[in-house]
Image: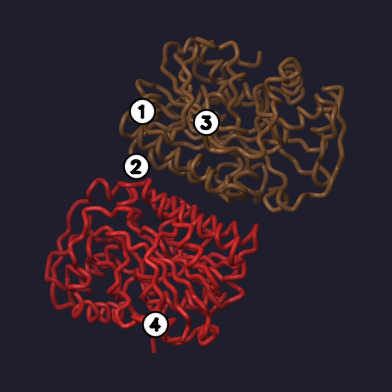
Chain colours: A red, B brown
Amino acid sequence: MTQETTGQATEAYRGKRVLITGGLGFLGSNLAGRLVALEASVRIIDALIPGMGGNLCNIDGLQGRVEVAVADLRDPEALVRALDGVDVIFNLAGQVSHIDSMRHPLDDLGINVESQLRLLEACRARTPEARIVFTSTRHLYGRPERVPVDEAHPILPPDVNGIHKAAAESYHQLYHRVFGLPICVLRVTNAYGPRQLIQHDRHGFIGWFIRLALEDREITVFGDGSQVRDFVYVDDVVEAMLQAGLSERCLGGTYNVGGSQPIAHRDLVALLIELAGSGRVRFVDWPADRKAIDIGSVYLDSTRLRQAIGWEPRTPLREGLARTLDFYRTRMACYTAPAPSRWEVA
Amino acid sequence: MTQETTGQATEAYRGKRVLITGGLGFLGSNLAGRLVALEASVRIIDALIPGMGGNLCNIDGLQGRVEVAVADLRDPEALVRALDGVDVIFNLAGQVSHIDSMRHPLDDLGINVESQLRLLEACRARTPEARIVFTSTRHLYGRPERVPVDEAHPILPPDVNGIHKAAAESYHQLYHRVFGLPICVLRVTNAYGPRQLIQHDRHGFIGWFIRLALEDREITVFGDGSQVRDFVYVDDVVEAMLQAGLSERCLGGTYNVGGSQPIAHRDLVALLIELAGSGRVRFVDWPADRKAIDIGSVYLDSTRLRQAIGWEPRTPLREGLARTLDFYRTRMACYTAPAPSRWEVA
């Protein structure tokens, strides 16, 4: 019973017109599937920028049941069309690779900052009543001063991506406060599950490790693998987003969406190899460019969200990983097409 | 003795090749004059965007003694030329109007964020040894949780301009930490003095009030004028910048540059009218768009900078205002040309 409703009845989405930005990506497509099952009217806008998380395979089975616009949020006409008549916006579009943001900071600025500002300006002008759930990231806490990290922790962005996500989050908080847009911000920890990008190693490492395990390859862990992280299964994130889109208590708030069991990298890899029945581990020194933006051990305190909407992560890591491995086993071709050496803005 | 050297001997600037971004603006042009007096080799890059702080009158008397490029930092070729051979960069370019940032947020993004990222990327590639002093603002503390505000206070940007200045500041901190660029960040409170824009009322209110007083017009104060601010005279800011550009202790740090005497708006206006011998005050209700981004009482704690480089504000408010009034009395034509209804990117 992994999709158990923890707060308000998600049946409230029946007939609602929902826009998902970045809806062909990992979180967005899982959300889209759930919303279709809840009989919402689902529209997706996604730029499908090569090397990023968008993948048409992610909506296999939803053809004809979701409306898809392959377009950039920075395209004013596409944005106007996407917003037409929407009740709820799940705002998930973004560049998520930390290392790419350091290599191509101006591209990251356009995708993660300019796009968000254009979206909010358009919402202010056209859909001021539409609920907005913005998915931010635990990444903007940087190398934490304390763990678990709660929402009062200072924002210490460790890289360009963190700076840009912090700016995007601040826009959302501001547009709620000053213009009254009904917005809730979720800071999501490391998410994992079906439909995550596993094409290259520049997104979250967990997807990449899953691929390596399934292909019976060597998994490289930096340092001694003692750094601790928390992981949240995608269905749990989807549940948090659905609740946040309905809850009045969420409005204007910023909430951590953390995992249940913090775990060291080395233990995560061991569990993954055990569940996959393949793969092996090797420990190596930190590469300089990754070490420079590493953040040590970090995991979130989600108490605030539990108190606001009753949300908790429900899927144990072992169960979530097993389901994820099952998903990719039959769909590797869709998710392992050759990766571009870098992403480019179409 | 207002230019007394508080820390390292500013004679060290003799012969140094210095670039001032935004060098035709208020702080930049005052700094340029001082650096010329110190026999530095001074280059200015300034986009002279209409309605912003740049004004060729600001370098009256420096003709032939400074090199001026009227160009935008987002122009890659102009940027490369500007950086050629520089030892120290005083990075002052920016859009400073809070209200304009809310009306034209995408323009503010280009000027205050994209420009800064392009500059730092160019410095990383071309002038990694050049010292950089970035002038940030107390504005990014937003409506403070406590006063005086020290550097550990949370960043709570109250408007788009604050979000963008916070991002620009974060870039500087990051490029120091990750790429080793020698950078010091100064968060300057309300500065005032000769060469400040007084063309319209969308920059700091103090310049506008000075103009109104000199023109014997009515000065409008929002609310009861009880909100308290601190003010720092431009020569003191210049001194802080000069010291920051020399001090090893500053590197990687972020420092408040505050004023000496926090004062209520109504008392400031009374002092100004007394010194000018003209002008009058009227109290009115807050306009909605200004109230929405108002930050209440705020003044800074500059202890950290005093401990690092011995800097303190030295110019009493009464003396600084009197000098400022004297400056504008003979130069009003240069500073009161009709204001554009808004600034535009050339």
Cα–Cα span, label 2 and label 3: 22 Å
Residue B337: where, in percent of width, then height? 69, 26
Of the residues shown, which amino acid type is indicated by label 4? Arg
Residue at 64 percent across and 26 percent down: it is: B313
The nearer-to-camera label among 2 and 4 is 4
Element marked by disc 1: helix
> Do the residues marked 4 and 3 share a common chain?
no
Cα–Cα span, label 4 and label 3: 52 Å
* Neighbour tally class for label 2: few under 14, some 14-19, many 20 plus, Cα within 10 Å: some
Of the residues shown, which amino acid type is indicated by label 1? Val
Of the residues shown, which amino acid type is indicated by label 3? Leu
- The residue wearing badge 1 is B80
The nearer-to-camera label among 4 and 3 is 4
> Do the residues marked 1 and 2 share a common chain?
yes
Placement of B143 over or under B8, stated as above or below = below
The nearer-to-camera label among 3 and 1 is 1
Q: Which mark is residue A65?
A: 4
- Looking at the image, tell me whether mark 2 or mark 3 is earlier in sequence order: 3
- The residue wearing badge 2 is B178
Residue at 27 percent across and 47 percent down: it is: A289
Cα–Cα span, label 3 and label 1: 17 Å
Q: Is residue B26 visible?
A: yes
- The residue wearing badge 3 is B92
* Neighbour tally class for label 1: few under 14, some 14-19, many 20 plus, Cα within 10 Å: some
- Looking at the image, tell me whether mark 1 or mark 2 is earlier in sequence order: 1
Q: Which mark is residue A177?
A: none
Placement of A231 over or under B48, stated as above or below = below
The nearer-to-camera label among 1 and 2 is 1
Q: Nearer the viewer, residue A234 or A346?
A: A346
